[in-house]
Image: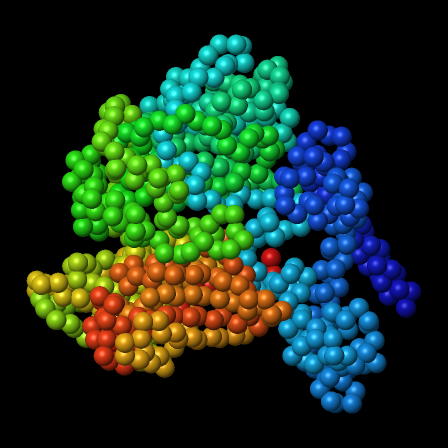
Amino acid sequence: MKKALSILLGSAALAGSVVALRAQSQQAEFDEKFKAFDQNSDGIISGEEMSAANYLPRLDLNKDGKLTREEALEAVQKMRKLAGNVSAAADALSEGVFRRMDKNSDGKLTPDELPNKKWFNNLDTNKDGSVTLDEAEKAIASLRKNGGIGSPATQSPVKPASEDPSFKEAPEFLKGSDHGVGRMVADTALKTLKGGEIKLSSAMGKNGLVIVLFSASCPISGKLAPEIARLEQDMKELGVGILLVNAPPGQKAEEAARFIAEHKLVSPVASDAAATLSQQLAATTTTEVFLLDAARTLVYRGALNDQYGLGYTKDKPQHHYLRDAVASMMKGEPPEVVATSAPGCALDLPKEKAVAATAATYHRDIARILQANCVECHHKGGVGPFALDTYEDVIEHAGMIRKQVERGAMPPWFAAPLEGLSHSPWLNDRSLSGRDRAELLAWLNSDRAKGDLADAPRPRVFPGEWSIGKPDAIIAAARPVSVKAEGTMPYQHVTVTTDFPEDRWVRGYEILPSAREVVHHVIVSVHEKGSKVRGGGDEGSQGYWAAYVPGNTSQVYPEGFARKLPAGATVSFQIHYTPNGKAVEDTMRMGLLFSKTPPKYVIHTTGLANHRISIPPGKADHVEVAQRTLPVDVNVMAWMAHMHVRGKAFKFEVTLPGGKTETLLDIPKYDFNWQLRYDYAMPRFLPRGSTIKITAIYDNSSANPANPDPAKTVRWGQQTFDEMMIGYMEHYTPLTPEVATK
């Protein structure tokens, strides 16, 4: 008995020690986070320091506009306590427990049956003096959405800093054209620390230049210094120069020199005391890096990597944004990520600086706008109907360019801005920035100055047959499909049985028809070995494995994400051909990129379809609606809408468990010819119990020039003269429970 008691007491002591150590660790982490925001080390976060993160004002308990360490710690502890209380309540209030608490079995809990007043008030959302099971579940789901309850099995692996009240701020993806990416950077002259002068061109390597902002007093600049030192050697071998720029206007030259010496950095160093370069680049923090190619085109801007941010440190980076951008530039390709925010010490610069108006020229300005927004499709051998690689190409098609830009048809992007957001939530936002659009149209309406050839950007280099690079495997149809010259064709169904002996994880794919000029769209489904494959008009309405639609022909997933291709699976292609006046044969192929290791997250695409649509003859604005309640928490990666030629507009909305409704994606001008996938820059978390609603508007009137028959009542069907209504949701789930609980 004494031995058992000794073991129990020892275990208790050990548990107490673990708790104490964890508390000490959290305390140290908190202090580090506080110091990161307290830039002048006066023990108070105040003034401009309070604007470094939008959640800091929420920690200001006494509302005096500043934060002491003790006040911030108290606020964070209150948030953690609330989160723990809510989570405990959610775990406790299962249906079985509800039934046991419901002593009179009337399906409701009264204050006597739920004596915790605080929780009774939280769950009694309609304030009728009682709580039903449905009411309790919805209230808890609402609290989960507001941050009180975690759903570890499906939480996003990366949470936006704006939703994180614990001092953390990580890089966020930004739309490059809104932040100067693709623009030419002037050959600015800066002062060296010794009072001399250095131009960007003199620091440039033969293949480009990395501008690294730093501050001798910013902790994150210090943490990044070892990686900067490694970059100095690596970039030298690649022919890319590095210019270190001391960004804070008030920092003394001797402080910057001491920083350089302590970290053994050897690149040229300049001071931007007058904020000349920072203004030109619209820099925001002392940790931003800017990658310029040899023609001084801004290729990437943002964080060096994601190892350090405000309030967090990783053992090693997960994403090497700058190195990846340099690798893409060296191959003549645009980076996958062209702009991010850069967590660091904020620069106190005016938001905008008046710049003297300069007449745009083709070589300096317009060629870069077209390269960033148009040439990806409009190059020789591209999917665009004509090339826009040269000045002569642009002059030849100037009328069409102007018309399509003015009417908003090009570049193809149809999502309306979402209310309340300061920047686009879409990673693949193709819309022209206001500045680019105005400058392009002004040039087209002028004498179209060619400018100095020395200002021209480097020509874009495009991959060969496969835009995703050489595939690891190709799934090809055994024989071609004959496509007639005229009329319409029923959907074609092609199946291929794979011979992979084990499951494969696919991190990217590309669908490549041999006669893409007659292929409108392809839906790819994957069927387990031995399952029956049925072809038909409903294939794809419940989801798909891969798709080829106008504007989306390939996809490469982020690191750690993949789709499953089961061993021995059958792959089916549902193909919609549109004859174009010439009989051809088409052979369908799909290239696959395999992940070398199992992913953390498995990607799925689910379709919400309305098979009961009925569009009356002559109706110009016929509305159809469908909705579905989510049975589980969902992390959404993308949305895609599908209708046919009568489709006019499409909208995705969500009603959260607490009753709040918001628009997820609004496509006010749907275009059958461009069925884009809208990819989130950060996954969107939707809690269990949320209701997804899709609304489609159809134009079956004679005013619709694409309408095959305005006198017909139109219902669901395969052909273009029929209609469909599908809202696709791309989402992910953890591969294993271990991943889910991290």
Which quadrant is the N terminus positioned in? bottom right
| Residue 103 seen in the figure | yes
> Is 69 left, or right, of 648 in this rendering?
right
| Residue 69 seen in the figure | no
> Is 262 left, or right, of 289 in this rendering?
right
Which scheme is used to colour this image of the protein? rainbow
- Would you identify the image quadrant in which residue 299 lies? top left
Residue 678, given in percent of the width and then of the height, sits at 40, 57
| Residue drawn at the location 73% of the way across and 47% of the way down | 59
> Is 634 left, or right, of 383 in this rendering?
right
- Would you identify the image quadrant in which residue 645 lies? bottom left
| Residue drawn at the location 26% of the way across and 60% of the way down | 673
- Vertical side of 485 occupied by 510: above or below: above
Which quadrant is the C terminus positioned in? bottom right
Q: Nearer the viewer, residue 617 or 202?
A: 617
Q: Nearer the viewer, residue 697 or 186?
A: 697
- Would you identify the image quadrant in which residue 458 lies? top left
> Is 33 left, or right, of 215 in this rendering?
right
Farthest-out residue, right? 2
Q: Nearer the viewer, residue 198 or 534?
A: 198
| Residue drawn at the location 53% of the way across and 34% of the way down | 351
Q: Nearer the viewer, residue 304 or 699?
A: 699
- Vertical side of 518 occupied by 292: above or below: above
- Vertical side of 633 occupied by 271: above or below: above
Residue 734, given in percent of the width and then of the height, sits at 52, 62
